[in-house]
Image (cartoon, helix red, strand yellow):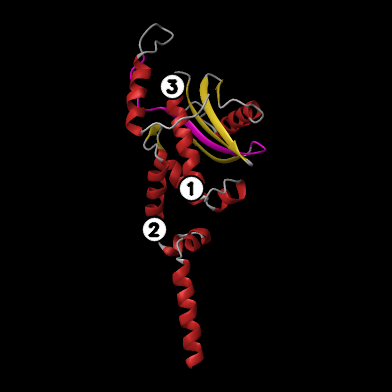
Amino acid sequence: MSIVFLPILFIHSMRAYNHVKIANMDGGILEPSLYSLKALAILDNDGNRLLAKYYDDTFPTAKEQKAFEKNLFNKTHRANAEIIMFEGMTCVYKSNVDLFFYVVGSSNENELILASVLNCFYDSISQILRKNVEKRALLDNMDAVFLATDEICDGGIILEADPNAVVQKVAVRNDDIPLGEQTVAQALGNLNPEKVLQSAKEQIKWSLLK
């Protein structure tokens, strides 16, 4: 299955259509719901958690969450597929170098919606990491990665599926953080190289004139 991008408005219409058409185990019809996601996660190539957000009480404790992540990793890290049904849930995923990205929804959730969220999740982080999508770069930029995750989904509701919009919002929120509260990576990332060079030249000039 190839993963495709869907605009956010189409996502909401697809979600409503998908739920209206599916009957539950009791023969009733599922009501449309905006709560599409159960979890977003990034694991390293040993199956260890680097980031995880859970949006319902399917796994209420940290122990249960980590057990699910480990089992999910063991099931997917050598598989060629991009989607699986696992423990009664639909999981879409992709990997790059030493990172595994996961989006988890209910068994009834539309696969195209989950795939679109996965694309946004991965592409947003790829832009933040300047296409250097690997563990070390991720750990150096975790503040921005958490902000991006929150821009994509809140409480299980999909907020954004355009990675460019996500990255722009993250940049605005980073600019609002006081310098004293920024990490070193954030502070350095906000510096304009041309301005830094010009400032250094000015300092050298004035030191020679003294």
Near mark 3 (Cα within 10 A), the count class, few <14, some 14-19 or many ≥20, is many
> Mark 2 or mark 3: which comes first in sequence?
3
- Identified by mark 1, the residue type is Gln
Could you tell me which secondary element the residue under label 3 belongs to? loop
Nearer to us of marks 1 and 2 is 1
> Disc number at residue 109?
3
Q: Is residue 195 visible?
A: yes
- Displayed quadrant of residue 6: top left
**Compared to 58, does 197 lie above or below?**
below
For disc 2, the marked residue is 175
Q: Is residue 38 magenta?
A: yes
> Mark 1 or mark 3: which comes first in sequence?
3
Tell me the magenta residue range.
Answer: 30-47
Q: Is residue 206 left or right of residue 139?
A: left
For disc 1, the marked residue is 127
Near mark 2 (Cα within 10 A), the count class, few <14, some 14-19 or many ≥20, is some
- Residue at image position (45%, 41%) is 149
Measure the C-alpha gap from mark 1 to mark 3. 27 Å
Measure the C-alpha gap from mark 2 to mark 3. 36 Å
